[in-house]
């Protein structure tokens, strides 16, 4: 059977939403500090990079624009970091959560190997100025990371 999409189906609506003021400044600052490279993989493509907050935006409004609260991460790694699938130990080495570890072992995922497992234990590349705050990373490791 063929679906008929000729009927007018509403696909958009108008909404009022909050906009993150200062987010563009934070992004520009963090990417520049990290020389426009992911601090894990070295990915140099700005369109694929995110200025990631170590302490979540929603929970720590006073740290939202603090450059010590930022990491330059490739989008895949930003999502994994935000969701607690990866973090960094006290020596700034990448640690991988059990979900990624298990999927990589059970399913032999080349994507997980290339994007995460191969970087396990790698030391975070930190900028010369405004290095990530170790207490912020500690908070992430103990309250967000699912080790």
Image: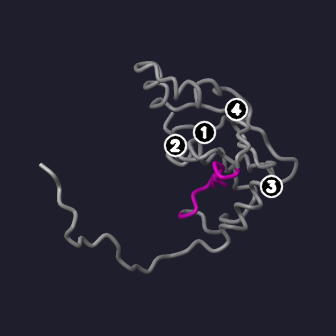
Crowding around mark 1 (Cα neighbors within 10 Å: few <14, some 14 to 19, many 20+) is many
Position of 47 with respect to 96 (left or right) is: right
- Whichever of labels 4 and 3 marks the residue nearer the N terminus, that label is 3
Rendered image: mark on residue 93: 4
Rendered image: mark on residue 84: 2
Crowding around mark 2 (Cα neighbors within 10 Å: few <14, some 14 to 19, many 20+) is many
Residue bearing mark 1:
87
State the CA–CA distance, disc 4 to disc 1. Answer: 8 Å
Above or below, 104 against 34 in this view is above
Mark 4: secondary structure? loop
Position of 31 with respect to 94 (left or right) is: right
Q: Residue at x 70, y 46 (%)?
A: 45
Residue 102 % position (x, y) = 44, 24
Nearer the observer: mark 2 or 3; the answer is 3
Rendered image: mark on residue 32: 3
Residue 47 % position (x, y) = 65, 52
Magenta part of the protein: which range? 46-58
């Amino acid at each position: 059977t063929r679906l008929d999409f000729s009927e007018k189906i509403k696909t958009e609506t108008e909404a009022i939403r909050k906009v993150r003021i200062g987010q563009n400044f934070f992004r520009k600052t963090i990417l520049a500090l990290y020389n426009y490279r992911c601090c894990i993989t070295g990915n140099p493509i700005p369109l694929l990079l995110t200025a990631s907050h170590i302490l979540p935006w929603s929970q720590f409004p006073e740290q939202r624009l603090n450059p010590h609260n930022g990491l330059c991460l490739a989008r895949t790694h930003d999502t994994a970091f935000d969701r607690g699938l990866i973090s960094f130990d006290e020596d700034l080495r990448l640690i991988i959560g059990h979900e990624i570890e298990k999927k990589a072992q059970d399913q032999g995922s080349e994507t997980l190997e290339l994007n995460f497992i191969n970087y396990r234990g790698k030391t975070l590349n930190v900028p010369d100025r405004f290095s990530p705050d170790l207490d912020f990373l500690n908070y992430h490791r103990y309250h967000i990371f699912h080790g």
